[in-house]
């Protein structure tokens, strides 16, 4: 079996003040994924190595990792594509907890803030919520997100300002705002309208390049800018006495 | 290492004024893409590139074209909006390069766009008014 | 066990690290030559308001090598900007008809057709038709 040079970023919070690199050599064939290689290292070379994974089929979103500086899913990236060897580091822009594991709580807080779930009025008595294919098509692409956070690692604005809600959270807000069954848009807009909402984005666009699910978060964020602008215009023309963002104050 | 609690779901963050600047930036972006190549190619570089003659850019014709009421569209589309477009990108660029952010940078950026735009409009208006 | 997360630094040179970031910075930098373009027009507008002599002086100014160089840069920058801007349009404002979206290439080519049309229109306004007969 051919072997490949792999350079891993290690960080042991008990001993280290900063991460360092460690070299490994792994055996691989055409079907060896980066995740497989990490398992090989942990099983045969260094059992102290820490990394995250679960589904091994690009669906759980837990194996995000920087491969040669590019955010990738470990289970969807194959050694055969890196004949010159590869360098693995924890997902960029997040605090590193240990080795290849990052603290994603910032992303998760932002995700919670935009209420990424259907806020729907009850369907008429015993009826399901109906939706036409055209209504589905409006948001379908944005619903494929697996919350892997690769787009956050790709986003310099999130790196520069961690309070920025970021690509996936805004894409999911947009996904529910576009859903014909949803009526929670007003609750989400308050978040999106802020400097840390859609306006934190400068359309670098790299988030959409790295997304393993074709979500195109950059499109969602920038469609959100139009939505936020219209929302502002509407608020402007509303009678001033009406409390703004009614839903927020309850 | 936690982000501050200000923007957790419980509080309503302040609405950004960015829609104003972004709208001007976008409108400017369209103008830069649509009008600037034509004007750069035919007016600013027209003679050196041999695309137009000095005779074609003669004083009378340009006077008539630019200080025509429709010339205001050119002032807005080729100067005012592109200025807002440019200063918006510079404002964000300063933040990207970690050179400056905050109120002062913002005032300076959009302030200079306002100032130079006013200058362009004033130059146009004084002549247009005078020539009736 | 207590936690000690390591926060990776974000140096001001972050944008040098990946081609996608360098491309982004190049796109943002197109506004620098654009500012020179606007300055050239401002000067032109001023000259035009001052009378024929100063307009002729302005036309001569336009033909100085350094002015030609900077305006050529502005032209290239505006075309590069157009290329990036047109590509964003179908992403930001997808035109939908029922469950179908207008293909991106169609929207992009329509915008380039617009650029060409504006060039032709200006050429016509500048008496291009008569001058080349
Ligand atoms: S938008 Fe794409 S890259 Fe971002 S979290 Fe969702 S699946 Fe991952
Ligand atoms: S292990 Fe689930 S996405 Fe890779």
Image (cartoon, coloured by chain):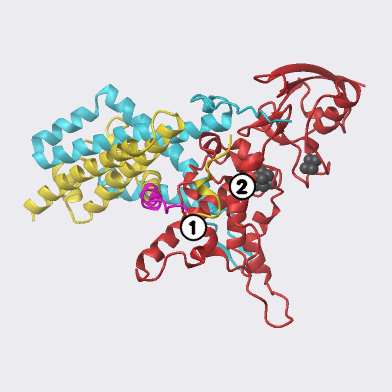
Magenta highlight: main SS: helix
Identify the image quadrant of residue C128: top left
Identify the image quadrant of residue C56: top left
The reply to whether the residue tagged 1 has its Cβ within 8 angstroms of ligand 1 is no
Query: Within 10 Å of the Cα at label 2, are there few (<14), some (14-19), or many (20+) other Cα atoms?
Result: some
Q: Colour of chain A?
A: red
Residue at 41% from the left image edge and 60% from the top image edge: A232
Residue A155 rendering spot, x and y as whole percentages? 57, 38
The reply to whether the residue tagged 2 has its Cβ within 8 angstroms of ligand 1 is no
Residue B44 rendering spot, x and y as whole percentages? 28, 35
Residue at 69% from the left image edge and 75% from the top image edge: A130
Q: Colour of chain C?
A: cyan
Identify the image quadrant of residue A42: top right
Residue A37 rendering spot, x and y as whole percentages? 84, 28
User: Which numbered marker is on residue A109?
Assistant: 2
Residue B71 rendering spot, x and y as whole percentages? 22, 51
Q: Colour of chain B?
A: yellow
User: Which image quadrant shows ligand 2?
Assistant: top right
Query: Which residue is tagged 1?
Result: A190
Q: Say whether residue C62 is left or right of residue B63.
A: right
Q: Is residue B45 visible?
A: no
């Amino acid at each position: 079996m051919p072997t490949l040079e792999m350079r891993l970023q290690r960080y042991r919070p008990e001993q280290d003040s900063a991460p360092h690199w460690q070299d490994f050599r792994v055996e691989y064939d055409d079907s060896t994924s980066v995740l497989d290689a990490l398992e090989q290292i942990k099983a045969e070379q260094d059992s102290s190595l820490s990394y995250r994974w679960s589904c091994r089929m690009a669906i759980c979103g837990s194996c995000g990792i920087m491969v040669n500086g590019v955010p990738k899913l470990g289970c969807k990236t194959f050694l055969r594509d890196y004949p010159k060897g590869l360098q693995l580091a924890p997902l960029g822009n997040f605090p590193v907890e240990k080795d290849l594991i990052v603290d994603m709580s910032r992303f998760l807080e932002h995700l919670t803030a935009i209420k990424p779930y259907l806020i729907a009025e009850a369907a008429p008595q015993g009826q399901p919520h109906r939706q036409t294919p055209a209504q589905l098509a409006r948001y379908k692409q944005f619903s494929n997100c697996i919350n892997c956070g690769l787009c956050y690692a790709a986003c310099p604005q999130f790196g520069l300002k961690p309070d920025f809600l970021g690509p996936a959270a805004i894409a999911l807000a947009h996904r529910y705002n576009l859903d014909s069954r949803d009526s929670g848009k007003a609750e989400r807009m308050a978040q999106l309208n802020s400097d840390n909402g859609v306006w934190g984005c400068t359309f670098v666009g790299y988030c959409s390049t790295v997304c393993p699910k074709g979500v195109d978060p950059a499109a969602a964020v920038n469609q959100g800018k139009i939505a936020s602008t219209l929302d502002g215009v509407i608020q402007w023309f509303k009678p001033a006495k009406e409390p703004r963002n009614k839903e927020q104050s309850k | 290492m936690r982000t501050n609690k200000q923007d957790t779901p419980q509080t309503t963050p302040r609405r950004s004024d960015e829609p104003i600047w972004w709208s001007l930036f976008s409108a400017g972006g369209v103008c830069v893409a649509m009008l600037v190549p034509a004007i750069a190619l035919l007016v600013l570089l027209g003679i050196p590139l041999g695309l137009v003659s000095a005779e074609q850019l003669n004083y009378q014709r340009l006077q008539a074209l630019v200080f025509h009421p429709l010339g205001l569209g050119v002032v807005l589309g080729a100067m005012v909006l592109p200025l807002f477009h440019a200063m918006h990108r510079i404002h964000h660029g300063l933040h990207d390069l970690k050179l400056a952010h905050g109120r002062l940078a913002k005032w300076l950026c959009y302030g200079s766009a306002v100032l130079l735009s006013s200058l362009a409009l004033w130059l146009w208006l004084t002549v247009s008014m005078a020539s009736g | 066990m207590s936690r000690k997360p390591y926060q990776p630094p974000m140096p001001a040179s972050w944008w040098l690290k990946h081609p996608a970031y360098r491309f982004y910075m190049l796109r943002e930098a197109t506004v620098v030559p654009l500012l020179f373009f606007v300055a050239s027009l401002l000067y032109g507008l001023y000259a035009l308001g001052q009378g024929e002599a100063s307009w002729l002086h302005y036309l001569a100014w336009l033909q100085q090598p350094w002015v030609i160089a900077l305006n050529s840069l502005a032209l290239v920058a505006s075309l590069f900007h157009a290329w990036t801007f047109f590509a964003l349009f179908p992403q930001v404002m997808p035109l939908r008809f029922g469950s179908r979206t207008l293909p991106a290439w169609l929207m992009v080519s329509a915008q380039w057709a617009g650029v060409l049309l504006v060039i032709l229109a200006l050429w016509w306004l500048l008496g291009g038709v008569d001058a080349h007969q």
